[in-house]
Structure formats: C-alpha cells, structure tokens
Image (spheres, rainbow, N blue to C red):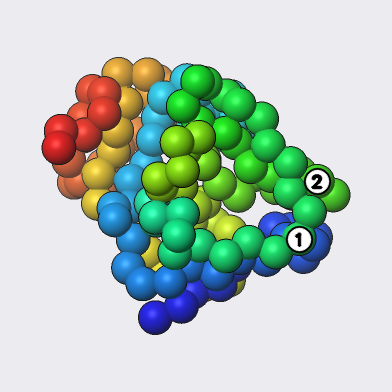
C-alpha cells in the first residue's frame, strides 16, 4: 500500500510505501520546539520506503535528527535520521490524516502539563523500550 501526503502549500509531496515501523506521539522538548506544537505525532518509515518531491530544507535539531520542512510554506513534514535509516512522517501531513493511529506515547517525562493523556495508550517516560 502506498500512502501520499504533502505540505500546506502543495509544493512538497511524498509517498510512503508499506506499513510503518511504529506510530508514536513524541512529547520531547526537541519535538515541541521543532514542531511549534505540544507534541509530534508521527509514523516511522525506512527512508528507502519514502519518496519526496519538491523543495525541502532541513535543520539539524540534534546530532542524530534533521527536521525537514517545506521551503515555501514551512510545514514540518519529517524528522529525518541523519544516519540514513528511518524518518518520522507527520501524521497530519498525510492526505488521509487518519491513515495511522498512534499506539504509544514517548518522552512523557517532558510532556506539557496541561496535555492530558486519557487514550489508554502505553506511556514511556523516555524512548520506548526495544
Ligand atoms: Zn509547502
């Protein structure tokens, strides 16, 4: 199965092949700042399963992760591992925004206090085990 998505202005389009490795909501401070949002809900894919067209720019938000966004409209689309392995794709950027549902919360120790997690999903203080 191939799922497609893109940024707000439409300049950047992407395709994701197959099923994601995992679907998680990250509450870490780095994601909060990078996304300008309380958390980052993303589906993790192998970079080899992703095709991206259009003008993107990137910012290294840590030694291991680039934030990839549309050069034109600024929509944050990917958290892109700099070692060439995997990338987190923003769930909201898929054409079908309900294509994937998260199964876990990670880095809950850094969660914004007013965010209430009442969905019954497992919560991890830091990275998920395994
Ligand atoms: Zn755009």
Sequence-wise first label, 1 or 2: 1
Q: Nearer the viewer, residue 30 or 108?
A: 30
- Residue occupied by mark 2: 71
Q: Is residue 33 left or right of residue 45?
A: right
Determine the residue located farthest toward the bottom in the rendered image: 1
Q: Position of residue 55 (x, y in %)?
A: 78, 54
Q: Is residue 97 visible?
A: no
Q: Position of residue 119 (x, y in %)?
A: 25, 48
Q: Is residue 4 visible?
A: yes
- Residue occupied by mark 1: 54
Determine if the C-beta at disc 2 is less than 8 A from ligand 1: yes
* Figure quadrant of the N terminus: bottom left
* Figure quadrant of the C terminus: top left
Secondary structure at numbered mark 2: loop
Q: Nearer the viewer, residue 98 or 15?
A: 15
Q: What residue do we see at 52% from left, 40% from top?
A: 79
Q: What residue do we see at 52% from left, 51% from top?
A: 90
Measure the C-alpha gap from mark 1 to mark 2: 9 Å
**Which dot marks residue 103?**
none
- The answer to whether mark 1 and mark 2 are in CB contact below 8 A is no
Secondary structure at numbered mark 1: loop
Determine the residue located farthest toward the right in the rendered image: 72
């Amino acid at each position: 199965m191939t799922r497609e998505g893109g940024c707000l202005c439409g300049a950047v389009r992407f395709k994701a092949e197959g099923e994601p490795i995992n679907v998680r909501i990250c509450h870490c401070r780095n994601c909060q700042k990078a996304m300008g949002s309380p958390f980052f809900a993303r589906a993790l894919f192998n970079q080899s399963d992703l095709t991206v067209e259009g003008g993107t720019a990137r910012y290294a938000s840590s030694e291991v992760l680039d934030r990839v966004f549309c050069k034109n409209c600024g929509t944050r689309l990917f958290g892109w591992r700099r070692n060439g392995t995997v990338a987190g794709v923003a769930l909201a950027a898929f054409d079908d925004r309900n294509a994937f549902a998260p199964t876990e919360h990670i880095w809950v120790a850094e969660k914004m206090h007013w965010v209430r997690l009442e969905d019954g999903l497992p919560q991890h203080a830091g990275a998920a085990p395994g």
